[in-house]
């Protein structure tokens, strides 16, 4: 019976030595710090989303800028002009126009009125589908 107490006491002291070992404590501290940083980043992202929801104009501006940035990585865009951006919601109504012959629902159309240029962009595949001239009626 006495030997049983000694072996239980020895394993408990070994566990204490492991828990308070400097390497274990360092790894534990680094893990906790990493988790804290990730949670803080998620919190900041959530706050930014809440701010955008409170201001729909700002949300639209941010979304449009993301689209322009994505298209700008694929093709040279006209400088000094902010495009008007539209979303294809009914491709059947547009099929008689050659520019929209390959359009799909969800595609974005960037219209640069001063440069008289239109770009059909598909966000789902990150590809420019069509580029054409804009004819603006007087």
Image (tube, grey):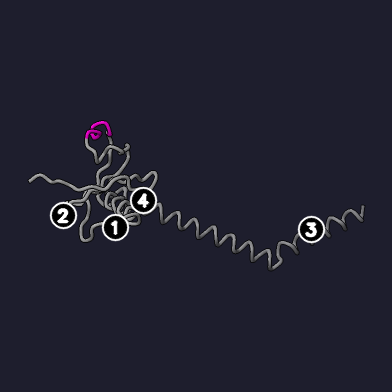
Of labels 3 and 2, earlier in sequence is: 3
Residue for badge 3? 12
- Residue 132 seen: yes
Q: Nearer the viewer, mark 3 or mark 4?
A: 4
The kind of secondary structure the magenta stretch mainly shows is: helix
Q: Does 24 appear above or below 65?
A: below
Cα separation, mark 1 vs mark 3, equals 68 Å
Magenta-drawn stretch contains 109: no
Distance, label 1 to label 4, CA atoms, is 30 Å
User: Is the C-beta separation of discs 3 and 2 under 8 Å?
Assistant: no
Q: Earlier in the sequence, mark 1 or mark 4?
A: 4
Q: Marks 1 and 3: CB-CB under 8 Å?
A: no
Residue 76, numbered label? 1
Query: Is residue 84 visible from the viewing direction of this image?
Result: no
Q: Are marks 1 and 2 in contact (CB under 8 Å)?
A: no
Residue 120 sits in quarter: top left
The residue wearing badge 2 is 114
> The residue tagged with tag 4: helix, strand or loop?
helix
Label 3 with label 4: CB-CB less than 8 Å: no
User: Where in the figure is residue 122, as x and y percent of width and height?
Assistant: 34, 44
Q: Badge 4 local density, few (<14 within 10 Å), some, or many (20+)?
A: few
Measured Cα–Cα span from mark 3 to mark 4: 49 Å
Find the distance from the CA under tag 2 to the CA under tag 4.
33 Å
State the residue in front, 103 or 8: 103
Helix, strand or loop under label 3:
helix
Residue extent of the magenta highlight = 91-96
Q: Which residue is mark 4?
A: 49
| Marks 2,4: beta carbons within 8 A | no
The earlier-in-sequence mark between 2 and 4 is 4
């Amino acid at each position: 019976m006495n030997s049983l107490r000694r072996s239980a006491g020895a394993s408990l002291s070994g566990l204490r030595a492991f828990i308070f070992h400097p390497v274990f404590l360092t790894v534990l501290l680094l893990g906790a710090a990493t988790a804290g940083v990730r949670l803080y980043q998620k919190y900041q992202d959530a706050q930014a989303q809440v701010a955008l929801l409170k201001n729909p104009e700002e949300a639209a501006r941010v979304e449009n800028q993301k689209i322009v940035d994505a298209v700008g990585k694929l093709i040279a865009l006209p400088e000094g002009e902010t495009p008007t951006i539209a979303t294809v919601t009914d491709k059947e109504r547009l099929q008689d126009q050659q520019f929209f012959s390959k359009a799909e629902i969800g595609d974005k159309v960037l219209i640069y009125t001063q440069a008289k240029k239109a770009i059909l962009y598909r966000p789902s595949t990150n590809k420019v589908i069509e580029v054409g001239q804009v004819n603006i009626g007087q």
